[in-house]
Image (cartoon, rainbow, N blue to C red):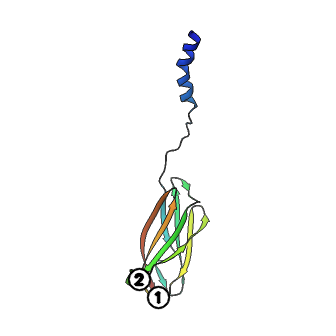
Amino acid sequence: MIKKLFALILLPFFLIGCQSAEEEEFVFPEATFSMSSEVVKVNEPITFEVKITAGEKEVDDAKVSFEYWMNEKADEEHTTIEATSQSGGVYSAETTISEPGTYYVYYHADAMDMHLMEKYEFTVTQ
């Protein structure tokens, strides 16, 4: 009887001790956007890039695209291009723009069941 009672008292301690001490707390993903230049010339390549991290970890399994449009034609047409993974949590896409003006770009990143997006402005000149 004492052995059974002793076992019942110690059982919770064994169960608690068996839980993983390395359970990680969820860290929200973050994105850092950059582009080859904030001022680009007509018909010259421009590269959009976003680096996605979650704490110290690089996120290499995200789905990323870039949506851009000319300010004067915001209601008419937006162009979306898919990004490719460059490794190290970096995703990029390159395009050329044939008309000068002020443009906006959003990156869209689906990472860790979350959607990240932010808007940036850039200029295309002659």
Residue 8 occupies quadrant: top right
Q: Is residue 17 above or below residue 5?
A: below
Describe the element under mark 2 as helix, strand or loop.
loop
Point out the tag, 1 or 2, that comes first from the N-terminus.
2
| Dot 1 amino acid type | Glu
In the foreground, 65 or 99: 65
Residue 13 occupies quadrant: top right
Q: Which mark is residue 25?
A: none
Name the residue that disc number 1 marks: 99
Residue at 44% across, 79% down: 69
- The CA distance from mark 1 to mark 2 is 15 Å
Q: Is residue 101 above or below residue 12?
A: below
Q: Position of residue 106 (x, y in %)?
A: 45, 71
Describe the element under mark 1 as helix, strand or loop.
loop
Name the residue that disc number 2 marks: 76
Q: Position of residue 70 (x, y in %)?
A: 42, 82
Residue at 42% across, 72% down: 120
